[in-house]
Amino acid sequence: MSSSLTAVEQGRETGQKTVPGPILLLGAPGVGKGTQAKELVNLWGIPQISTGDLLRANVAQGTQLGRVAKEIMGRGELVPDSLVDEMVALRLQAKDTANGYILDGFPRTLGQAGWLDGRLAAQAQTQGGGLPVIAVSIHVDYNQLLRRITGRRNCPVCQTIYNVNGKPPKRDGFCDVEGAALVQRADDTEEVFKERMRAYVALTAPVVEHYRALGRFAEVDGDRPIGAIATGIVAAVERLRK
Ligand code: AP5
Ligand code: MG
């Protein structure tokens, strides 16, 4: 096997099976949580659970949660813990989470982290075992984040993430996979990004410190090619699962 292959590609080639268990992807808006989650889904075959995507689906469907969340998300603030916890609880009941899952953008407050830790501890007691969470924090500096956020475009059908600055589609404005017209998220403006960053620093940075202190934690540099970052995450998870 060629040593130039990334860990993700090597895993695909050898059919290597790591049971990843629950993985948390933490980091500021635009660090690449969604992009990396999709890489890991391809490798491990476990689901990505993005609270941002679930909330946007609720907004699009006009559910009661979506009606509450729409304005809060539009301002770049966080949706109340109780609503997000309930949404995640429902999603975690699905059978596809049995070998693990990638929580993308959750927990985002110490309240949400306490809820998740309590739920996993209760599960371990009643169902015997279950792997503990591994938290991966991705870091990218502010100016790079702003460039990524304002350049992002999404496929509304298959959710592929593009960027006009760094990862453009082959045909300008259209998804490579679906051919669907790409869209820009309503909160991907400089003004809302600043609010999202404020919420991150005040409410989510303490969550990163919480998981750092628990020990099953890795920090990765997100200002590198997508494959190199994924390789770093896979290596960290394999090390922390030993
Ligand atoms: P959410 O959707 O989670 O937004 P976010 O945290 O602000 O993160 P993003 O999705 O903007 O960025 P990302 O890290 O996924 O980056 P991506 O891979 O797309 O949340 C939205 C809102 O919902 C919140 O503001 C809040 O209101 C609410 N919400 C969600 N969860 C909540 C919770 N738990 N509690 C309360 N409220 C909640 O990449 C970004 C761009 O960079 C893309 O264009 C991509 O192509 C590009 N890129 C990625 N990696 C690289 C790379 N290595 N090099 C160059 N470009 C790259
Ligand atoms: Mg995302």
Image (cartoon, rainbow, N blue to C red):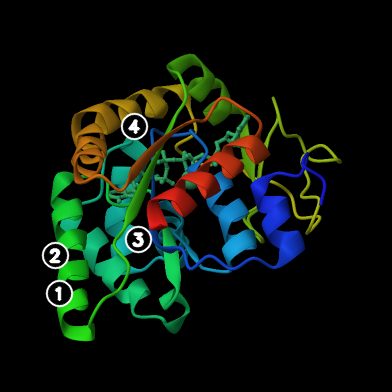
* Image quadrant occupied by the C terminus: bottom left
Of the residues shown, which amino acid type is indicated by label 3? Gly
Question: Which residue is nearer to you in this view: 144 or 67?
Answer: 144
- Give the Cα separation between the discs numbered 1 and 3: 29 Å
Of the residues shown, which amino acid type is indicated by label 4? Arg
For disc 4, the marked residue is: 196
Of circles 4 and 1, which is in front?
A: 1
Q: Quadrant of residue 97?
A: bottom left
For disc 2, the marked residue is: 118
Of the residues shown, which amino acid type is indicated by label 2? Gly
Task: State whether residue 142 is above or below residue 167.
Answer: above
- Give the Cα separation between the discs numbered 3 and 2: 26 Å
Q: Please tell me whether mark 1 sits on a helix, a strand or a loop.
A: helix
Give neighbour class at mark 4: few <14, some 14-19, many 20+ (Cα, 10 Å): many
For disc 3, the marked residue is: 66
| Residue contact between numbered discs 1 and 3, judged by CB atoms under 8 Å | no
Label 3, ligand 1: CB separation under 8 Å: no
Task: State whether residue 81 is above or below residue 192.
Answer: below
Q: Quadrant of residue 22?
A: bottom left
